[in-house]
Image (cartoon, helix red, strand yellow):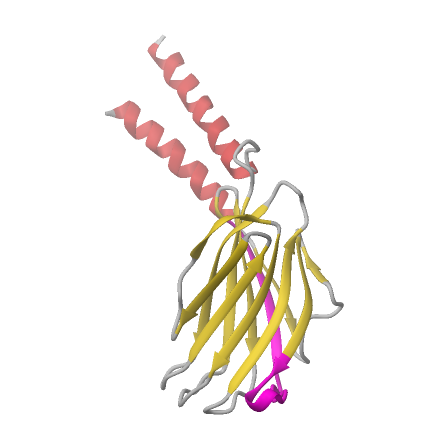
Amino acid sequence: MTRLKLIAGIVFAALAAGQAKAGTITANFPNGFPTPNPFQQQDKSWSNFLDLGGTGGISTLSNFNTIVTTRSNIYPGQDLHTFTLLADFTANSTYEISYDITVLPADVELIAASAGLQKSIGVASITTHITSTGLSKDITTSNSSGLVDLGGEFVTLHVVDIITTGTSDITGFLNSFLEDAPDDVPEPASLALLLTGFAGLGLIRRRRA
């Protein structure tokens, strides 16, 4: 039992150390879409931002800002990136926004995505249409979809968000994307966990000797 407790303690400590290193990087653009275009944050590139028009095909998006956030090491080998758009939305209107997201290293892929709305009352909906080579995926929700598996691994995604405000008090919408590193390349947190585990096993063997 003592040995099991020691191993459990080593694993917990390594995981805690990995989570302690997890960081959040946020870029806020209070006057519209990210600039420069493309905008790069760590290993992600965001580009081709377009307001495709509101109700009646007229661009009605006003007083808006965008926020791009990256959270590292949510799980070993994975990063989560979120695109948020805040604006003065009009009730009973439709808005359509598009952009591209690309991961720059050739050995990293996007594997899941989500859509969500920021509101407290009323009915609204968002449909996020995601396309890439071999991919056509719609995520529709009136609140928050949670991460949806894209069914593959993709370097570039083209995203079109269609927001219907309805009677809600919507103030923004957001998309999140999960990036996965290749299985054959250990992440620093995973490698530290593995090495710490080996060190713990060596300590146990020395005590037995």
Q: Which residue lies furthest to the right in this view?
A: 36
Q: Is residue 65 magenta?
A: yes
Q: Which residue lies furthest to the front in this view?
A: 134
Screen quadrant of the N terminus: top left
Rendering coords of residue 186 (x, y %): 55, 33
Vertical comparison of 131 with 2: above or below: below
Vertical comparison of 195 with 58: above or below: above
Q: Is residue 142 magenta?
A: no
Screen quadrant of the C terminus: top left
Instruction: Name which residue lies at 51% across and 70% down.
Output: 174
Where residue 122 sits, quadrant-wise, is bottom left
Q: Is residue 84 left or right of residue 151?
A: right
Where residue 38 sits, quadrant-wise, is bottom right
Instruction: Name which residue lies at 74% across and 67% down.
Output: 37
Q: In this view, does 118 lie to the left or right of 207?
A: right
Vertical comparison of 26 with 108: above or below: below
Instruction: Name which residue lies at 50% across and 68% down.
Output: 128
Foreground residue, 106 or 170? 106
Foreground residue, 193 or 209? 193
Where residue 130 sits, quadrant-wise, is bottom right
Foreground residue, 127 or 23? 127
Rendering coords of residue 10 (x, y %): 40, 32
Foreground residue, 171 or 159? 159
Vertical comparison of 183 with 156: above or below: above
Rendering coords of residue 39 (x, y %): 71, 63
Instruction: Name which residue lies at 61% across and 74% down.
Output: 66
Q: Which residue lies furthest to the left in this view?
A: 1
Instruction: Provide the residue span drawn in magenta.
Output: 52-73
